[in-house]
Amino acid sequence: MAHFAQLDETNTVTQVIVIHNNELLVDGVESEQAGIDFCHNLFGGTWKQTSYNGNIRREYATIGGTYNVAANVFIALKPYPSWTLDSSYDWQPPTPQPVGMWHWNEAELRWYEAPKPYTSWDESPSPYPSWTQSENYHWQPPTPYPATGVWSWNEAELKWIEDILPDEFV
């Protein structure tokens, strides 16, 4: 399958479509121009081929992204207002990302470390302050879950409250 991006008059990508590779064949050889002509005949407008693996025009075209005619590359959407485009057509933050799992905070213009995933049950937070952890790392309420019915824990009263279900669920 081949992917083609439609461009508006400012070279902004307005849509990306998939067409069968057979539409690219001219005398048994793939031709981008044949794909462009196929897309133009269906939808009008200006089209450029793109690819998921970045083999064509550096980056996969995304709606709202742009096409740089001089460099013949697609450029992704700008992720944040403070980021700038480098000479390799990659968006760069005002300060480099530290090693590890970090997220950008545009309001503060800084990186913050992503929460670490729990590596064991004993690190997971308690669902309620009154619950304690059992020997096998399961969170336990102060009183056992009732044997029948559907119940919700009420932390304010430290007890189970029976849920009233509509007739169609009973």
Image: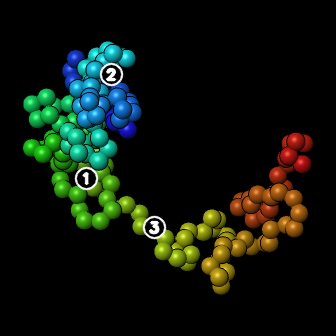
Crowding near pointer 1: few (<14 within 10 Å), some, many (20+)?
some
Indicate the position of residue 99 as horizontal and vertical percent values. Answer: 25, 65
Q: Is residue 63 visible?
A: no
Indicate the position of residue 157 as horizontal and vertical percent values. Answer: 76, 61
- For disc 2, the marked residue is 38
Depicted 98 relative to depicted 132: above or below: above
SS at badge 3: loop
Q: Residue 9's quadrant in the figure?
A: top left
Q: Is residue 88 visible?
A: yes
**Whether label 3 touches label 2, CB < 8 Å:** no
**What amino acid is at disc 2?**
Phe
Q: Which of the two discs, 3 and 2, labels the residue nearer the N terminus?
A: 2
Can you tell which of label 2 and label 1 is closer to the viewer? Answer: 2
- For disc 3, the marked residue is 117
Q: Which of the two discs, 2 and 1, labels the residue nearer the N terminus?
A: 2
**Whether label 2 touches label 1, CB < 8 Å:** no
Q: CA distance from mark 2 to mark 1?
A: 46 Å
Q: Residue 40's quadrant in the figure?
A: top left
Give the residue displayed 9% in from the left and 44% down from the top.
87
**Whether label 3 touches label 1, CB < 8 Å:** no
Can you tell which of label 3 and label 2 is closer to the viewer? Answer: 2
Depicted 16 relative to depicted 105: above or below: above
- For disc 1, the marked residue is 110
Q: CA distance from mark 3 to mark 2?
A: 48 Å
- Taking depth in this image into account, of 85 and 46 the one nearest to the observer is 46
Crowding near pointer 2: few (<14 within 10 Å), some, many (20+)?
some
